[in-house]
Amino acid sequence: MSKINLKMMSISILLFTSYLALTFDSTAQDIVVEEEVVIQEDSELTLEEALVIAVADNLKIKNSFLEIKKADNAIWAIKTRLFPEFDFSLYEAYHLTDEAFEFKQGAFGDFPIIGPIPSENTSIETTPDFTTFITATASQPISQLYEISLLIKQREIQKAIYDQEFRARVLDLTDEVKNEYYRILKTQSMLEAQNEKIVFLTSLLELVNRDVEQQRLLEKDSLEVQARLARAEYKQFKLQNSLATEKERFNKLLGRDIETPFTVVPIGYAAPFTVSVQDAEEIALEQRPEIESAELDIQFAENEVKVKKSKYIPEVGVQFQYIANLNVELLPENIATIGLFAKWDVFDWGRKQSEIAEKKKSVIQAQNRLDEATSQVLIDVNSKIRDLEEATVLIGVTELEEIAAKENLRVVMNKYKVQDALLTQVLEAESSLEEKNSDHQKAILDYWSARANLDRAIGEN
């Protein structure tokens, strides 16, 4: 295709399904369970179904999703600091001793007409009793709102980084599932080819035994075919074991019981896949989680510099306070105040300046990581494009070789039936066809593996 048809509109169906499954509500869980039952009853497992199951049941992806939800909680926790803070305290005390308050003559003043207050030294004594102190405070930060908004942005950037980590895990799992699926297909196709070989050798053995009975061939010829048939049956048995092991590993990758039976659906060779290198590079730089994460790291580091600079701003706020003193005769029973409070760290021995310098260096490091990630992504994309181009060319070559080998075997077999060809020629033609058929099937599956690797390289699910 002239342009890579791989741009994500928002998130692919695969990602949407994973989000749905990971919300952990009962409805989503019911959907996943029902889907699994259908897939288990139908032994055919398509690649798309395998991808959905893998993403929905993978524990690492579930943990990545939980990191995103934790980030939401952290963002709201910081946002609450924008609102007034309310404190309430209650202190109930019982006097174990008698308190005496001494007021000297004239302690409250000496007036011309009235005279001194009190007029003489006065002692006021209390008796043991309960005393209650109630304090209620409401504080609203003002100058700190700027710093709090920066902290909120910091958490939002961190959540975006977790989003990219989630996408990266999905991409890695998707790539792994695809390659394992193609590996099973490769083994299955080799097994099918081996089955065809056994059928052919069994039929050939009947012809050879007939010719031995008619003394047109020697017993050694029959033994040679029998040996080849036995070798083919052993290889068939070995491939069956390999296929069983690969299916168990694949079930484990999908998070299912390893004994779950299934068969993979063969994938044929599609039309030639052409890629514009420039388009692939642009899409990769837009979609690869590594690039997104590196760009977010720069934003995170730049925001940290702003947070440190905000420490120079004095802390200023408004505070309302109410105090109730019960059973204390000498103090007002109710006191209510409102005012401003301020705090300023005037001298810190250069601590803030050093912290800002440290964070600025972190910005430079983040920019360097972005440049490095960009180069690595472009190298990866170009390498995967070359692999795909090679795989595409190889399919055409192996297809022609397979057609030629089939025609050669057909001709030699017809000649052998009319005694115009030797048995060795038939066996050589059959071995050549087996090799070319295997090469062609391998080339097709290598092509799809190359397609999967390219999808991963450009950040496509």
Image (tube, helix red, strand yellow):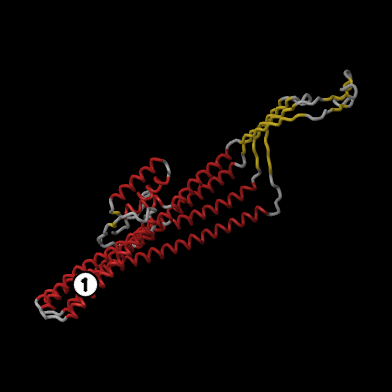
Which residue lies under the disc numbered 1? 433
- Taking 227 as reference, is 443 above or below it? above
Which quadrant of the structure image shows residue 92?
Answer: top right
The answer to whether residue 318 is left or right of residue 75 is right
Which quadrant of the structure image shows residue 249?
Answer: bottom left
**Horizontal and vertical percent position of residue 104:** 89, 27
- Taking the spot 19% from the left edge, 68% from the top edge, the residue there is 199
Which quadrant holds the N terminus? bottom left
- Taking the spot 68% from the left edge, 42% from the top edge, the residue there is 343
Which quadrant of the structure image shows residue 212?
Answer: bottom left
**Horizontal and vertical percent position of residue 246:** 35, 61
**Horizontal and vertical percent position of residue 377:** 42, 62
Q: Label 1 neighbourhood size at 10 Å, few (<14), some (14-19), many (20+)?
A: many
- Taking the spot 70% from the left edge, 51% from the top edge, the residue there is 348
Number of callouts: 1
Q: Three-letter amino acid code at disc 1?
A: Leu
- Taking 383 as reference, is 51 above or below it? above
Report the front residue among 455 and 443: 443
Report the front residue among 23 and 231: 231
**Horizontal and vertical percent position of residue 232:** 25, 71
The answer to whether residue 282 is left or right of residue 391 is right
Is residue 328 visible in the rendered image? The answer is yes
Is residue 428 visible in the rendered image? The answer is no
Report the front residue among 228 and 1: 228
- SS of the residue under disc 1: helix
- Taking 9 as reference, is 424 above or below it? below
